[in-house]
Image (cartoon, rainbow, N blue to C red):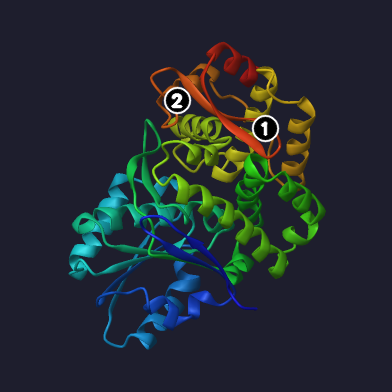
Amino acid sequence: MNARVIEVGGAAPYRIQIGPGLLEDGTALASMLRGRHALIVSDDQVAPLYVQRVHQALANARPGARIATHVFPAGEASKTLENFSAVIEALAAHGATRDACVYALGGGVVGDLAGFAAACWMRGIDCVQLPTSLLAMVDSSVGGKTAVDIPQGKNLVGAFHPPRAVFADTTALRTLPPRELHAGFAEVIKYGAIVDAGFLDWLEANTDKLLANDDALLTDAIARSCAHKAAIVERDPFEHGERALLNFGHTFAHAIETEQAAFFGYGSGVNHGEAVAIGMVLAAKLSSALGMADVADGERLRSLLQAFGLPVEMPVGLDLLALLAHMRLDKKAQGSGLRFILWDRAGAARIVAGVDEAVVLATLQA
């Protein structure tokens, strides 16, 4: 099957390729390398599966290239300033010049961390995203958002740094644990919720085949998701307006993740995709509480998320007032108060500022 191609336009255009075998396409991977220095950044779960084949593919296509590897422990707990510094030190030890390229091989944590390091090394070098999780393929690898977490919140330190290219090798999804595959579908479903109600119909009709790793249908789901994100990012690269729609459910999700981390560290409890699923259910409930949307739309969304094996209830034991405090510090909050991405109906999301905290608290309590 030939790779599907999505073009992302704007001031820094790039191409997303989606299909099987892309991690072994040395010619394509090496074509992104302007100079001699390449650093493959991965984690200790993905590296044993794919680093050697990416390294070999690059070396075969560019015999003169100097290729190094940096691996860090897998998981959200690794998305720290300390590990960011370690990638910077790896670039320094490698003697990486301004025409060097970082290859981010892994899920969203790898993409965020490696992308942020690439954004900062010598004020910005190329980064090629090689996402190996569904969530990274449809969300974090596209759009150029890079960041690390701090105790006060997720992704509060980072930079916009569009990739030079994205290669989403769908065969990598075969080695993905079922829980991680399910988590990625939260972000897929999100695109239907915010801009494409017909996509929700398609996902409902193909749930079982998608969960069974049907290559053709997964490629279609990834391509459709990436096309939606690419169109939005092209129009609003720095999230001054429409791009905020991509955060549907994320204000709640990030608050849940941050509050969990306060007790157990990042990566404990529900993962990011699961938190987004819960957050979207809460966003739909808040929309109904504000008189914007029909309750039935929220119930349909909830049922679809459950069909894809995702949680739809708040984790027990979280301090609701603490969640509100995290939302105030969220990147989407403004001086005028809490700002949420809500919807009028499936496929019609919009930005709502100055939401009454009492209504938010009542939604959390419900």
Task: Find residue 326 and name its label.
Answer: 2
Residue 31 image point, x, y percent: 37, 78
Question: Which label sits in the foreground, 1 or 2?
Answer: 1
Quote the CA–CA distance across marks 1 and 2: 18 Å
Residue 347 image point, x, y percent: 68, 40
Residue pictured at 51% horizontal, 47% vertical: 232
Q: Secondary structure at mark 1?
A: helix
Q: Is there any visible trace of residue 366 in the rendered image?
A: no
Q: Residue furthest top?
A: 358
Look at mark 1 in the image and give the residue it sits on: 281
Indicate the quadrant containing the N terminus: top left, top right, bottom left or bottom right.
bottom right
Residue 189 image point, x, y percent: 67, 46
Mark 2 packing: few (<14 Cα in 10 Å), some, or many (20+)? many
Residue 194 image point, x, y percent: 63, 40
Q: Secondary structure at mark 2?
A: helix
Task: Find residue 273 and name its label.
Answer: none
Residue pictured at 42% horizontal, 40% vertical: 239
Q: Is there any visible trace of residue 362 in the rendered image?
A: yes
Residue pictured at 78% horizontal, 39% vertical: 303
Three-letter amino acid code at the position of disc 2: His
Decide: is 253 above or below 41.
Answer: above
